[in-house]
Amino acid sequence: MTADALPGRAGRGAAGAGQVTAARVVYSEWVRLRTLRSTFVTLAAALVAMIGSSLLFTGLTASRWSEAGPAEQAGFDPSALSLIGFFLAQLAVGVLGVLVVTGEYSTGMIHATLCAVPRRLPVLWARAAVYSAVIWVLMTAAALAAFLAGQAVLSTQDIGVSLSDPGVTRAVFGTGLYLTVVAVLSVGIGMLLRNTAGATASVIALLVVVPGLADALPVSWAYRVSPYLPSNAGHALAIRAPGPHTLAPWTGFMVFCLYAAAALAAAALTLRRRDA
Amino acid sequence: MIVAHALSKRYGGRAAVSELSFTVRPGLVTGFLGPNGAGKSTTMRMILGLTAPTTGRVTVNGKPYAAHRAPLHEVGAMLEARSIHPGRSAVNHLRCLAASTGIPRRRVDEVIDLVGLRPVAGKRAGTFSLGMSQRLGIASALLGDPATVILDEPVNGLDPEGIRWIRGLLKSLAGDGRTVLVSSHLMSEMALTADHLIVIGRGRLIADASVTDLTRGAARARVFVRTDQAERLAALLTATAAPAAPAGPVRGGGPAGAGVAVASVGAGCLEVTGVSSERIGRIAADNRVALAELTPRQASLEEAFMALTGDTVDYQSPAPVLVDGRAV
């Protein structure tokens, strides 16, 4: 702990030493993500939400299937029921996506981050990429597990579907993709607003509250507006058979991607222009 | 080497920093001094590119900070907001920063040992005391083995042993030929650590001088006089005394305003600036004024600081400042 113990200035002058590269920034974001306890807690919650909801709701349906009326039986979508956990999981994914950014603003860590990467934008791209990649892997696996578990429960009543049925694979992997775009959207909104409470409320409002409010519109309007709202559009990919008032699966998903891209672009502009 | 040229930052209508120009040279510890709210942190943030100047520019080793390809090798900084996520351990905090510029794990361990945080390296930073957080902040600043080190109020929260350690560290960093810029609102601390001082008040440059020049120049020696003929002596001094030793320049040789000032500081007590005690004694004797006390008072660096920043303090206590402030 003496002052003269400062090690020499090794490494200086070596080729590429200390330079900021895209790969290094990505690796740094990976280290950041896995060195916070909140990451594990929140992602575990998302996994439990996906798989737990599937077991709970398919279990309830299977146990009461014989009492269900013909209309209820006709309108039943086994894959959607087993993937219903997405509704809760998106909250965990959205909140953590906000936190990986606003957590740095609230603690001042962002100053150290931007001193290490003074060009700033690589931080945003890398953070969105690393977080959404982690979400894609985990949530695709979770959706698959939830689907298989749910169908296993439903098959006791012989009402399950399999991955080879039309549209089912798309619905399962679409759930993972939907949550991946939620991840990008929430990182963008977090970087745009820089404030945990504001950004969290915005993400939840955008994904959950606004679609609910749209239902209060006169029906003819609601049919026109509702399909284009972010979560409705994106979730079209995760529905096996789209209804009359839903966008086509990939069209809807592209619309959702545009929302996320817009959030990311606004975040990039703010990050560049505004004082840190 | 840090070069600021006419650096200004306005927040709405308020100027945080105005037309600030200075050079911080390698091989010296440069103290960056000013009362709270003087614009020190804003200036440091502008050096690091975290805050964009409204006008003016600042370069580090010839380039804006953001233009450097290996930024952590150019500048290592600890800002006042400690910039540490409380959920990460000390080691992991440093690893996050090291990773983005390819600094090896070995270097993380080196700086942990250097600042004496080895026993708590695996503990979450949120559990750290202020002093331990300061040490972690300093470790982050030294991570890239930087040519320039910028520390905002590094002694805050350190115990006496820690303060002594910081002083030694700063001197050895400068001794390596690095550029070292350290802010403080405590002149006494800077007097012991810094070689050169940049003093600002209300965002404006007040002094840019070596510590020696500043003490000699800014606060001239004052003489305390007690006599029952205070009024008469005051008149005599103002009328007859020629300037004593002229005050040195605060910056490179401007006139120092060597007038004589006599202030009444209580019944029968005077405080005289600009006249030596010998000359006061002589004038008193010549005019048959009996003196009860004649005491020269060497200005401390603290008083020099007060003299320089006295009329630029934003949040001032009602007590009057002893020596008049004086612009350069």
Image (cartoon, rainbow, N blue to C red):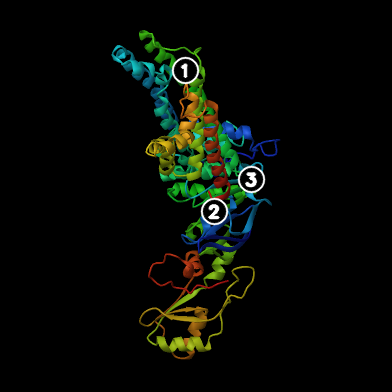
Q: Chain of mark 3?
A: B
**In this view, the mark in front (1 or 2):** 1
The residue that appears at 41% across and 72% down in the rendered structure is B320
Quarter where residue B206 is shown: bottom right
In this orientation, which residue lies closer to the viewer: B304 or B318? B318
Q: Residue at x 49, y 30 (%)?
A: A234
Left or right: B187 in relation to B66 = left
Residue B205 locus on image (x, y percent): 57, 65
Image depth: mark 3 or mark 2 in front: 3
Residue at label 3?
A: B74
3 vs 1, front mark:
1
Q: Is residue A22 visible?
A: yes
> Which residue is identified by label 2?
B182
Q: Which residue is mark 1?
A: A144
Mark 2: amino acid: Val
- Number of marks in picture: 3
Check contact, mark 1 vs mark 2: CB within 8 A.
no
How dense is the environment of label 3, judged by Cα within 10 Å: few (below 14), some, or many (20 and up)? many
Q: Hey, what amino acid is under mark 3? A: Glu
Residue at coordinates 44% horizontally, 12% vertically from top-left? Answer: A161
Q: Position of residue A219 (x, y in %)?
A: 40, 36
